[in-house]
Image (cartoon, grey):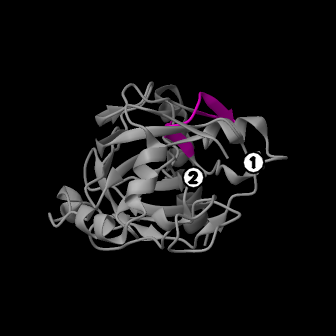
Amino acid sequence: MRHSVKATNLVNVSKRLALGAFLMASVSAVPLSSAMAQAAITWGGISVETGNASDVVTTGTIVEAATTGSTSTLNGVTFGVPTGTTGTIGFSGSSVTLSNVAGIGYYTNGTSGWDPNYISLVNAGAFGFGNSGVLELGGLSAGHNYLIQIFEVPWDINWSTAFTDGTNSSGYLNLYGDAVGISPASTVNDYVTGTFTASGSGQSIDLLAANGITIFGAVQVRDVTQTTSPTIPEPGSLPLMAIGLMGLVGLARRNLVRK
């Protein structure tokens, strides 16, 4: 699998990061982000990506979607692309941001037999060092229920990444690819879903590194709030309803007199 990287030479970085001492030194000791104060996310089990469009959840209504890969519309969901490559980056058509990005790795080879749009969705990943990465979601409404789905990308399996709200954490998502030397190679990459009730207009999610480096591929957020409300009559129908009620009252009175 061939890699090309903007803002840094990923191949050289990968070789250097193979050194256990460097990996340990790269782990950030700083506390997690403001995600500590965010809504708790209930994470589902980790799923293996199949390369089929049906992996992309369509429950509820789309709020925003973003990918570090190429422009992609999959199963009716359009994912915005990065507007930057390092530091804090945004994504087109979305209020999603990702902070402490060291660079974005791009891939010239996709997974054989996959939907081409799926390959575009996961053909790049943003990487960072230690547990410093923070995924920020915006455009939320307090009290609404949301579903989040995060996709991982082809990369070194040693750099599997978990996601946390500061209280609850997902499992570590695998990345497809060869290994630098710590773990055996993986033949799949994973995605995970979670649900939460927003406590405000945003939600922070921290990235957790299994071995000193985090990788982020793509995310979508969907509003899955179930709302039901009584039907309110049109103003013009209110007089008719009143007449009907008066008629029922009069009928009841006549029946009582007859008895």
Residue 136: x %, y % from top left: 31, 46
Quarter of the view holding residue 93: top left
What crowding class fits label 2: few (fewer than 14 Cα within 10 Å), some (14-19), or many (20 or more)? few
Residue 100: x %, y % from top left: 26, 45
Quote the CA–CA distance across marks 2 and 1: 71 Å
The type of residue carrying mark 2 is Leu
Residue 248 circle label: 2
- Which is nearer the eye, 124 or 39? 124
Residue 215: x %, y % from top left: 44, 53
Regarding mark 1 in the picture, which secondary structure is present there?
Answer: loop
Residue 158 as seen in the image, left or right of residue 49: left
Q: Are marks 2 and 1 in contact (CB under 8 Å)?
A: no
Residue 111 circle label: 1
Residue 147: x %, y % from top left: 50, 55
The residue that appears at 45% across and 43% down in the rendered structure is 10
Residue range highlighted in magenta: 61-78
